[in-house]
Amino acid sequence: MIAYEIGSIHPQAIPKIVEAMDQCHATSLENHLQKFIVEPLQSLNHPQPFIIIIDAIDEWRDHPTFIKALAHLNSQSHVVKFIITDRLNPRASHLPGIEMISVYTYALGPISKEVIKAYFQKHLETVPWVDGRRATPVDIEKLTELSGGLPVWALTVVAVLSHRFGESPPHEILEEIVASRRHVGSNDGLGELYGNALSRLFHSPEEQRQLRRYLGASLALQEPLPPSDFSTLSGIRSHLTDRVRFALSALQTRSPPPGSEDMIYPATALFHLSFIDLSGFRRHPQLPICATTNITL
């Protein structure tokens, strides 16, 4: 994928990438990095190192193997450097081989209030409001404050308000969120938002039981499955799977690739990791899965 992006942006590097395709079959990851990334970039003869940005690398199951292989590129920093975002400090997370890599860490701060406020101002316009009730400037200010500078909180608020088949109208849900005194930066405010959203989407104990079963099975998936195979694996009937999937779509931060919408994807492919961790759900024992991981930016 990285080589594809390099070739798309710098067509002059394509011959080296094609050459790598011929030479790298069944070779090591280190050799792939050398042939698919370093040598194509070297061929461009650029006076400054190229920067490759990889966001949320901890959402990739095999990221420890990739990180370990980067040690091979220590001597190539004049050719390429990586900016990698991760929720955990790589040195504190004890990734294998991290001590062999030339790495500098930088803690990202919260997004500015101005950016979060602009996000709300734009995206609240897309909410299907009813009865002429809309978010007021005071509401937007309160939401901005409650977000704690956490973009996923803002995204989740808009997603919950935009869910067209919820029982409560958007303005009532907004009133409940705005009335909250729990700041995202304190304790489990994000978990509370997820918990309240799931309580609205899955009302009865039976619906919540099916939600737990669905999430448990989708968290175990390593690759997408056809609905029939997922039903066999999970023991959940297809019509119940469809209902749970539809309701949970309100909280997805990613969409399946075009043309594969009917497949059942691993939860990690569709939802933000803070939702999967569910650390805020300790106060909601009737809802999905408890975890001890703290939610961090």
Image: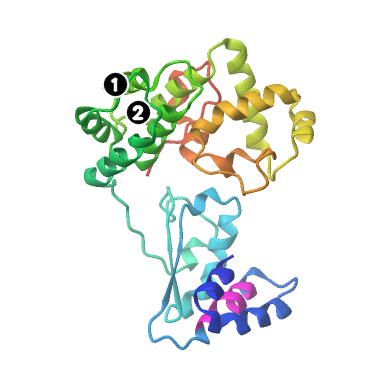
Q: Residue furthest front?
A: 132
Of the pair 286 and 228, the residue shown nearer to us: 228
Q: Main secondary structure of the magenta part?
A: helix
Judge whether residue 17 can be spotted in this image.
yes
Closer to the camera: disc 2 or disc 1? Answer: 1
**Kind of residue sitting beneath label 1:** Ser
Of the pair 119 and 65, the residue shown nearer to us: 119
Q: Which mark is residue 247?
A: none
Neighbour tally class for label 1: few under 14, some 14-19, many 20 plus, Cα within 10 Å? some
> Left or right: where does residue 14 sit relative to residue 166?
right
> Left or right: where does residue 209 sit relative to residue 46?
right
Mark 2 or mark 1, which has the lower sequence index? 1
Q: Residue at x 67, y 37 (%)?
A: 220
Read off the magenta span: 31-41
Magenta stretch containing residue 171, yes or no? no
Find disc 1 in the rendering and name its residue. Answer: 180
Find disc 2 in the rendering and name its residue. Answer: 189
**What is the secondary structure assignment of the residue under circle 2?**
helix
> Residue 178's quadrant in the figure?
top left
Residue 177 is situated, as x and y percent measured from the top left of the image, at 33, 23
Q: Residue at x 33, y 23 (%)?
A: 174
- Does residue 290 lie above or below 266 as drawn? above
Q: Residue at x 59, y 65 (%)?
A: 1
**What is the secondary structure assignment of the residue under circle 1?**
loop
